[in-house]
Image (cartoon, rainbow, N blue to C red):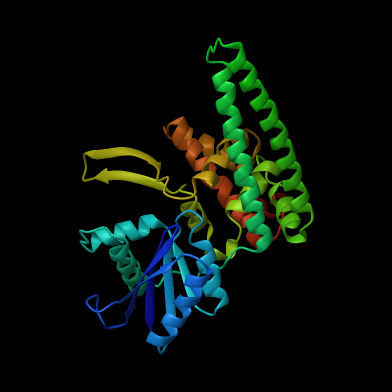
Amino acid sequence: MFYLGIDVSKNKLDLALIQDGSGLQTPKRKVLANGQEGFSKLLVWLHRRTEGQVHACMEATGTYYEDLATFLVNSGVEVSVVNPACIANYARSSSVRNKTDSVDALVIADYCRAKHPKPWTPPSPEAKELRELVRRLSTLEQTKQDEENRLSSGISSPAVVRSVERTIRFISDQIKELERLIEQHINSHPNLKEDRDLLVTIPGIGDKTAAIILGELPNASNFDNAKQAAAYAGLSPREYRSGSSVRGRTRLCKVGNSRLRRALYFPAVVACIHNPIVKDLYQRLLRAGKSKMCALGAAMRKLLHIAFGVLRRRQPFAALGENLA
């Protein structure tokens, strides 16, 4: 078995290839361009240096990895895409002192050899398009908020005020157009429409949040259970305890998809009032002495668990009932 670690950056790919039993002293290394030409050269390089199955592994850094991961999967190579925090923690536990692209590729390869992470399934073209649409919408909404804050900050120049107001009107029109495109895109793909219709049966989740969930969590099969989906969103609790005297406050780990995490904040606030399962959890944590933010973080996690359950079981919220509690 061969293990290929790939450190992906915008312009290049650093490769490290190791084999079971070979140790880390004799890796095969290569640097290629991050693009279709580099992908093709990577396959040729692999075929010349391997005689058995190859398990490739890379970090989920931005969107730079996705084209390569999809290319390798379509070429018959087993691919895993892992959280960068897992690689960083593994490097620390292995006493790796240096951090370069070449070293990172070797650490990723050894992580793959030691942990055998789950194979990655690429998102469908329509899910990928939806993700780009909802991310663009989020960017425009943030830009509009920045401009509105600027307008209310006390600027006195009439020319600047007019400029800001024109910008806000333009961005507002663009937001409306993107919202229309997102709805049209979902309605034109039966699988997305079915998933959206399932998600909006959950009290607290509306069309906008459903679109973000489908864009940022496009393939539930990449996760074995709801806990893994919550970890992907950075919604897993992180305790801080040691001995009998150290009792730090439990917080969200926040190592994961920040867009998905942010999208669940206000829906969780609504769910704490209108969703019986989330409301019961929230109130129970408050009675146990947890802070409101801690309880709300748990509500966000529970809401994502419910969304995962609805998508995985292909049944609306009301039909599953207590099975989601």
Can residue 277 be seen here? The reply is: yes
Circle count: 0
For residue 85, side relative to residue 94 (left or right) = right
Q: Quadrant of residue 149?
A: top right
- Nearer to the camera, 113 or 220: 113
Q: Is residue 162 above or below residue 92?
A: above
Q: Horizontal and vertical percent for residue 155?
A: 54, 13
Q: Horizontal and vertical percent for residue 281?
A: 53, 41
Identify the residue shown where x is 42% and y is 81%.
46
Q: Is residue 293 above or below residue 194?
A: above
**Which quarter of the image is occupied by the N terminus?**
bottom left
- Nearer to the camera, 181 or 220: 181
Q: Quadrant of residue 4?
A: bottom left
Identify the residue shown where x is 56% and y is 51%.
305
For residue 5, side relative to residue 212 (left or right) = left
Q: Is residue 163 above or below residue 72?
A: above
Q: Is residue 256 above or below residue 40?
A: above
Q: Residue lying at the far bottom in this picture: please name it.
A: 51
